[in-house]
Amino acid sequence: MVLSVSNPHGMVEQPVTERFERSADELVEISTDIGRELAITPEHPILTRGADGRPEWTPAVQVKVGDRVAYARDIVPPDRAVYWLDFLPPSATYVVQPISFLNRKSVPPGYRDLTRKLAIKLRTFKGYMGHRRNPPLRFVLSLAELLGIERKTLASEIRYVKSKWGKPVQLPPMLNEDFMWLAGIIASDGHLKKSMSDRRGTYYQIRIFNKDERIIEKALSILRKMGLTPSVTMRAGGNRMVQVGSNLLGPLISRFGIPFRDKSLRVFVPDFMLSFPRLLIGAFLAGVFDGDGSYSETKYPRGINTKVRAIVIATGSEKFACGIHELLLRLGVLSTVARDTRALTVNLNGRVTTFPNPVYRIIIRSIADIQKFRSWARSVKQIPKIEYSTYHNVNAHREAEAKRPFAWVRVTRNIRKKLSSPIKVFNLSVGDTETYLASNFVVHNCGRAGRPKYDKYGESVLIARNQDEADWLMENYVIAQPEKLWSKLAVERILRPHVLSTVAAGYAKTEEGLYEFFGRTFYAHQYGPRMIKGKIGEVLKFLAKEEMVVMEGRDLEASRFGKRVSELYIDPMSAVIIRDGLYNRAKKMTDFSLLHLISRTPDLAPRPRPRSSEMDKLGIMAESQRDEIMGYAPNQFEDPIAYDEFLSELKASLVLSDWISEFTEDQILETRKVEPGDLLRLVQGTEWLVFAAQELARLFGHNDLLAHMEMLRVRVSKGVKPELVKLVGLEGVGRVRARMMYSAGLKSIDDIKERSLTDLEEWEKAKSTRPAEVEQQIMLTEYEDTE
């Protein structure tokens, strides 16, 4: 799942339907005024604000300095329960008895089986059952899983936990705001210390430094609620230090990105915190703000009551600064990460200390963002409530802007870099929207990059006749949700060749294997594997009945007929129609008969529909040429639908007959009302089907039709009468030029051989096929005949 921008639903989670990888030898690096950067391929579309203020997709390479790009500002985390059990070390944590389900009523008899599953001794297990020993958390979790106890129930049963040597610590069932505030204040104004003892090994201390008495009192209160006994020490400069030792709480807090050494430079925000509920995130940020944050108001030079307000949190860790920025986005707060390379001198614990490393400041400037931070991060330090000015209805404008799931941030730099060596880049196909976040910038699926090998990216152009239409196109095409795709695999005509090819290629050798194979298709993903199972069974029955698939028990194998049909890429139903037509021929086999046989196949659909004025003519023709028609003619009154299909087959046959009779495209359009595009599709489909019929005739031993079919295939391909077949075999000679050559007396290859090059030049001076090329082809023909 990834975050995606959906109109009008805002930021939503969407499934990744496909992931694409490729190599790239150049990137575009975009920097913004909030300190965030994006490295992306030049052609990748980014959501930008157009000149009219409307959102538009722009390739990264075309984004200019000063442009505004979309940056996610409101990433809503899931509202879920977070349990302590997920963060405590299971082997080093001991659960203080009593535990309600550790008794004979809750635990079924047969302790020996349980002890084997739990990998402990029977004596130890009985000690836990008798509440004589405190079991480790690892044992409690494993036993709860065997007994089917839910996480929520288990968390409520555990009241006190302890380390091996330490005092018990009282923890509520779920992670709460007090603990998150404590983790935040330690991350900013405290540290963890790990020491070694000869008697008890490693022990941990937690320290918090601050001058504000209210912050110190809050830290003491939280630690005391946990059953600990912290101490307070006064230090130089008015600083107070809270100190407490706990071999359980120390390692627990370290899991929240707080190291034991060099905390200022190495502290970070762990990824799991990004999915915490907003209340917990707000409490952590409140602790960070109480430690290293400040709120300021500065008089602006212009205006009587104008002030510049800002919340600033400072840190020496770049990772921590970026993590705070990410956490703020979960509260709907947009911040700027600024890097200050100047050496910082501060009074730390009564000593003047200089930090040579860069200082990173997380800055919140917008009034709306300051108020959001104030509402979620309930810090000890006070942040005043600020109201918008009512001048020019600014309040309504700001509120509308804050509701948008992304903010427009200004581009400060755009550099196109040529890489020394190619790197792997990826693109995502995302359900419904095809948009996703890359480093929190809103980007779009690239789509196909134009023509392979020729274009780096594809372009679509929408032309509007007026502003209203432009608005409509923008709303319905550019920023609207893409139309959903629906699999058509369950359509029997589409499913038949897929089932046959799966068996013929050996991808499935049993019926169960076939169901498993199609269970991984897009159709099964949309509708479930059960929906397609019945249709596959029907197709299998058809293939077995027509002797394309041999079924022996549950085993499947393609016959010679089935394999050849699969290799020809035609619908098995078309193969059956051709096979039956070869065995049940028309009384008088002509070119029209073969064309009618091809026209009956589903692979040639859609066929040209006869117009009402053509119905009677086609009916009369069917009677007059009954001996040449393949199959039977349905009764017009008993089955009118089948009769209409029959007339459509006849019209397709007539169009193809006109084509091989050298009718021009304009003549066919005028007489048959068939457009050139439809004619081209009909001709190309027929050419392949005639070849398929020829191959099936060879398979079933109808050798008397092979030469006839080969002649017909060439005629359909070139659109010529029989006498021009050899001439159109010459390169560069089409139906028009071949007819001109034939009319000039060049009726065969021998006639061309007898003519000199001079005669050929006089015959055609303005044609693209040069006489020298024809002469060269004749010489090659003679050489092949000799061989």
Image (cartoon, rainbow, N blue to C red):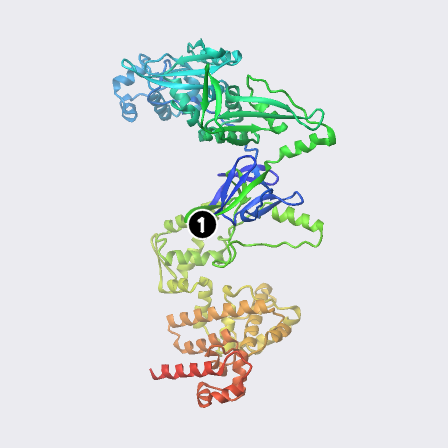
**Is 264 left, or right, of 133 in this rendering?**
right
Viewer-proximal residue among 72 and 742? 72
Image quadrant where one finds the C terminus: bottom left
Q: Residue furthest right?
A: 392
**Is 557 left, or right, of 449 in this rendering?**
left
Write down the residue under mark 1. 24
**Residue 527 x %, y %:** 49, 45
Q: Residues within 10 Å of mark 1 (few under 14, many from 20)?
A: some
Residue 150 appears in the picture as rendered: no
Viewer-proximal residue among 537 and 2? 2
Report which quarter residue 224 is drawn in: top left
* Type of amino acid under label 1: Ala
Above or below 364: residue 570: below
Which type of secondary structure does the marked residue at label 1 adopt? strand
Above or below 309: residue 401: below
**Residue 697 x %, y %:** 41, 72
**What residue sits 44% from the left and 48% below the top?**
419
Question: What is the number of callouts on the image?
Answer: 1
